[in-house]
Amino acid sequence: MDGEQQWEKDFGLMEDPLSVGDGSSPYIYNNKVIFVWDHAGASKIFAIDKHTGNLICQKDRDEDYTWASPIVVNVNGQAQVLVAGNKRSVGYNATDGNEIWHIDGLSSSVIPSPVFDGTNAFFMSGQKNGWIQAINLIGAHGDLNDSESELWIHDQHSSYVPSPLLLNGKLYFLRESRAQISCIDAKSGSSYYDAIRPKGMMGTYSSPVAANGYIYILDNRGLCSIIEEGTSFKLIQQNKLEDTFDTSPAIAGNHLILKGYNFLYCISQ
């Protein structure tokens, strides 16, 4: 907290002919920092000690470019690292890094992070032939292709950059990188409403967030739409900030924190 650097870790030279760079955020689990490094070279997943930066373990990944951030979830008392992929989506053992299961991936340029409801995980991509996979992780092991673990697939209007929002048995997501919201039943994959664009909203890289029964969608021009949670689309309010936004809103207690190109904002009562 005094601002003194504790350690740094160099993963080497990233092979990046697209000149896009990393997009995957690190994930802290217990004493580990988990980082996915997918690129045009030798892709890997690393776990390093959060106190020292020393390598704990690393595993090779048969992947090219992905930008999805991993998440760690608890499946029947076992911590798993869930990673979405172009070629394969994978669940790793969070203790030793060994692969627990895999399933065919999501096409190209996977960016959204997976979400998990305690039983089922949802993986998404939205470039070209984007789609959503719902996978039951209870007892999932080995190759899950053509197994009962794959619950359903949704192949319309999925998200390219923004991650989905899982809330009270419903999955909300934006179409490609547009501020057009869809809502489907997480259990069955059936649609409640599809790709509705709140008035005046344009493109967005920001993921939807939720608080107190409302969903917040922020577009790149600073227009925020507040939508009531539920199976039908209901726009409650729109507010505008004169700034440009690519990042997702963060909620801390009663505060909504927004990072624009020009300013950092905190909005509260």
Image (cartoon, rainbow, N blue to C red):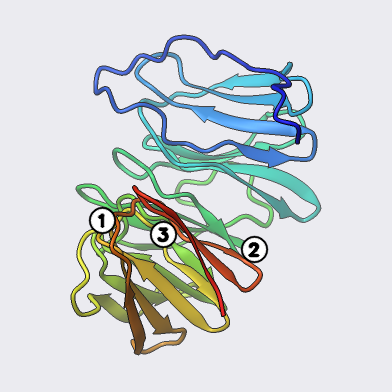
Q: Residue at x 37, y 66 (%)?
A: 173
Q: Mark 3 and 1 residues: CB-CB less than 8 Å, in contact?
A: no
x 35%, y 45%: residue:
106
Q: Where residue 250 appears, x then y in whole percent?
A: 53, 60
The residue to which callout 2 is attached is: 119
Q: Name the image quarter holding the C terminus.
A: bottom right
- Image quadrant in which the N terminus is located: top right
Query: Relative to 17, does residue 134 appear above or below in the rendering?
Result: below
Residue 91 percent coordinates (x, y): 60, 41
Looking at the rendered structure, the kind of residue marked 2 is Thr
Say which of marks 2 and 3 sits in front.
3
Would you name the residue on which mark 1 appears?
177
User: Outermost residue, top direction?
Assistant: 12
The amino acid sitting under disc 1 is: Ser
Badge 2 marks a residue whose secondary structure is loop
Residue at the spot 39% in from the left edge and 14% down from the top edge: 41
Helix, strand or loop at label 1? It is loop
Badge 2 or badge 3: first in the primary sequence:
2
Q: Amino acid at mark 3?
A: Ser
In-image side of 23 versus 27 (left or right): left
Disc nearest the viewer among 1 and 2: 1
Residue at the location (64% across, 20% down)?
58
Residue 180 % position (x, y): 25, 70
Mark 2 and mark 3: span between their CA atoms?
23 Å
Q: Is residue 220 above or below residue 15?
A: below
Q: Compared to 217, does 12 lie above or below?
A: above
SS for callout 3? loop
Q: Which residue is mark 3?
A: 207
Give whichever of 99, 8 is nearer the camera: 8
Q: Is residue 177 left or right of residue 51?
A: left
Q: Which mark is residue 240?
A: none
